[in-house]
Image: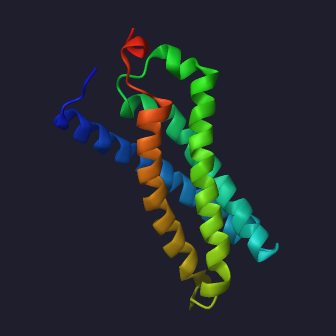
Amino acid sequence: MKQNKKDIIKEIIRFLIVGGIATICDYAVFYLFNLVILKSINSTLNIVLSTAFGFTTGLLVNWFLQKFVYRYITEKQTKSKIVFLKFVVVSLIGLGMTELVMVLAKPTFDTLTIHFIIDFQFWKLFFKVLMTGIVLIFNYLARKFFVFKNKKSDLE
C-alpha cells in the first residue's frame, strides 16, 4: 500500500503526538528518579538509571499507542513477539545513543547548574532534549521501515 504525501504528513503528526506523550512520561519518570528517588546515589549511576527508567516508561507508552500512528498495523503485528522484539531493539539503540551522550557530556557540562529552589543542572535538560530530537528521527524511520513495514502481506 503506497502512501500519498498527505497520509505521510498525517502519520508524522500522529507520531509526534504519541512521541510527545511518551516523552512527557519519559521526562517525568527521569526527573522523579533523578531528583527524588535516586538523588543520594553516585551521579553517573543516577543518570544512567534515571534515563533507563524514563526510557522504559516511554517505550511502553509508545508501544501501546503505535496502532494510532501506523494505521496499517494489523492485529497480528501487535501480538507478534518478533515485532515487539524489533520495536524494543530499535528503542534500545535509541536508549544507547542517549545514554552515551548523557554520560559523555556530564564532565564537560557539570558546571552549568542553576541554583533556584533545587540545583537544576541545565546540561541534563539540554542533552536530553537534543537526544530526544535525534532519537525521534531515528525511531520514526526505523519503526516505519523496519518494525512496522507497510507491505501487502502484512495488510491481509
Task: Compare residues 141 and 34 and report the one nearer the observer.
Answer: 141
Task: Compare residues 100 and 39 and report the one nearer the observer.
Answer: 100
Q: Residue at x 62, y 70 (%)?
A: 102
Q: Residue at x 53, y 81 (%)?
A: 122
Q: How many numbered circles are shown? A: 0
State the colouring used for the structure image.
Answer: rainbow
Vertical placement of residue 80 versus 12, above or below: above
Taking 135 as reference, is 86 left or right?
right
Give the image location of residue 81, x and y in percent. Answer: 64, 23
Taking 44 as reference, is 54 left or right?
left
Task: Compare residues 93 and 43 and report the one nearer the observer.
Answer: 93
Give the image location of residue 154, x and y in percent. Answer: 43, 15
The residue sitting at the top extreme is: 156
Give the image location of residue 84, x and y in percent. Answer: 60, 29
Give the image location of residue 42, x and y in percent. Answer: 81, 75
Taking 37 as reference, is 3 left or right?
left
For the N terminus, give its image quadrant: top left
The residue sitting at the right extreme is: 41
For the C terminus, give its image quadrant: top left
Task: Compare residues 155 and 29 and report the one nearer the observer.
Answer: 155
Taking 68 as reference, is 38 left or right?
right
Q: Residue at x 61, y 54 (%)?
A: 95
Vertical placement of residue 89 versus 107, above or below: above
Q: Residue at x 58, y 45 (%)?
A: 91
